[in-house]
Amino acid sequence: MLTLNIFSRFTAVLLLSLIAAIMMAQTPSKSISKVEKKIGSGKALASEPNAQPANLTFSNVKTYTYDAAFSNADPQPDFYIVLRSIGQAVVAVPADGETYFVGDAIGNARVVFIGSDAEFSPRGVLAGTTFYHSVFSFNGSDGTENYLQENPLTGYTTTPENMIGDFYEGINSKSEFFIEELQNRIRPHNSFAYGDYVNIMINGFEYQDTTGGQKVVYCVYTGYAHVYDDPFGWIGSPGGTLSREHTFPFSWFPHNSESAPEYSDYYHLFPVHQNNANNRRSNLPLGVVQNVTYQFLDGKRGTDAQGNIVYEPRDSQKGNAARAMFYMVTRYDNTNGYQWQLPPQQNQEILKLWHFSDPPDAREIARNDYISSRQGNRNPFIDSMHFASKIDFQSMEWLSVDQITSAGFKMSIFPNPVMDHMIIEMLVVRPGEIKIKLFTLEGKPVDFQDTTLSAGINTTVVNYSDLPAGIYILTTVFGDQSYSLKLMKQ
């Protein structure tokens, strides 16, 4: 009797083991993976949705924004997650059991939307850019997320290169009335309060989504990333580090009114780190620092090649800063009886070289279009690189001949005609070797020399006392750029 009971129990255990083995063998690998995740996380996954959404469409597509909508899945899941990549299709897939936030990176994409709505308007939109999207249904939250990973809804949209339209129709840069025509086109404009900057610029354009559901605003001068949770706050508020920088310093204004439109003109107001950028720049001219006395990330303060104290922003902001200054003096010169121009301490040649060597990128173009949608005017020097070469910004006079003929390099000589010695002044954006050659009109080489230039203004004195009288061609070669002009020797 005892032997029989032991045998029966053994048989029962064996049968149960066989049944379990058969069931495990028939279980799909995906379900096995989910069982393992349940064991690892301690939470059971929610049920997997049965369908993906459909019909992804885009509207209101501009350089700085667009809206997207789709049809709900049937049956409708708890939530949707949207992944977006730039310039290529999304290949990333969300992982079951993982909780994501807007701004998180997944493979080649970032999360731009999570929610139950069937529409979204993502941040970080750039001009002339193609954005690809994948929309996934999922159920669950807080570690129980179960994503329908197969066959997501996909779609893409391409933003326009710019939104200039016919804004400058009828304006002729070859006309002696060019400056007046340009001024009449960009003024007046809708003026907003200085205190509205957070709502209009930070919340409307400047902030970007970053990991963990937080937001980030960058210091334009240094590249410092101010990461925060809503609400955004300036320096002085809890966790605040940034302030609004007048790229054209307030002390350079021909008046001291903080209620004037120019004080809060968003085209020259940018977020910067208050203590390590705004305070350090103060009202210094912008220039190329040769001897650094203070540096925070990519922003530097120090002396230039001539010994002047200047501030140098990071490379990606140099052209932006130049165009902001060009805009201010053009927009406000001869307004309410005030004369505006770049002050003597601000070298406009440096700004023009920055303007040409750091042309507007997709984000600056988008920012220009966004501000235009609010203020109703535009920064013409973002819209046209050529406009800056037609204006002397320190006298606000029209130039009949383009002042800048090559990006990144400018040369002038004096005196011309030359007697014994000639001074060659060269302005370059970056250091490098330059070749200076002198030819007769027939092309016969007469003199040549090589020298090393530092970034900024360089001065070289050449002795031509033994050079016979006549007309010569002076040629300089700097990198892939060349510059030639006629020289008369008396």
Image: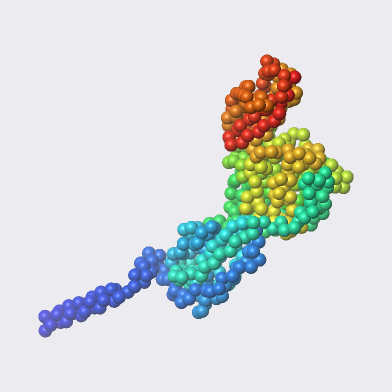
**What x and y, as percent, mark residue 149?**
44, 69
Q: Is residue 255 visible?
A: no
Q: Is residue 363 visible?
A: yes
Q: Nearer the viewer, residue 425 or 36?
A: 425
**What x and y, as percent, mark residue 339?**
84, 42
Q: Is residue 136 above or below residue 173?
A: below
Is 127 on the left-hand or right-hand side of 82?
Answer: right
**What x and y, as percent, mark residue 320?**
67, 46
Q: Residue at x 34, y 73 (%)?
A: 28
Q: Nearer the viewer, residue 192 or 268?
A: 268
For the view shown, which residue lies furthest in the right direction?
A: 337
Q: Residue at x 68, y 18 (%)?
A: 467
Q: Residue at x 78, y 40 (%)?
A: 400
Instruction: Say which quadrant the N terminus sits in.
Output: bottom left
Q: Residue at x 88, y 45 (%)?
A: 337
Is 158 on the left-hand or right-hand side of 472?
Answer: left
**What x and y, as percent, mark residue 164?**
71, 56
The image quadrant that residue 64 belongs to is: bottom right
For the view shown, which residue lies furthest in the top direction?
A: 466
Is 207 on the left-hand or right-hand side of 28?
Answer: right
Instruction: Say which quadrant the C terminus sits in.
Output: top right
For the view shown, which residue lies furthest in the bottom direction?
A: 1
Q: How many marks?
A: 0
Is 468 on the left-hand or right-hand side of 104?
Answer: right
Q: Nearer the viewer, residue 10 or 124?
A: 124
Q: Is residue 244 above or below residue 1?
A: above
Q: Is residue 377 above or below residue 17?
A: above
Q: Is residue 103 above or below residue 432?
A: below
What's the coloring here?
rainbow
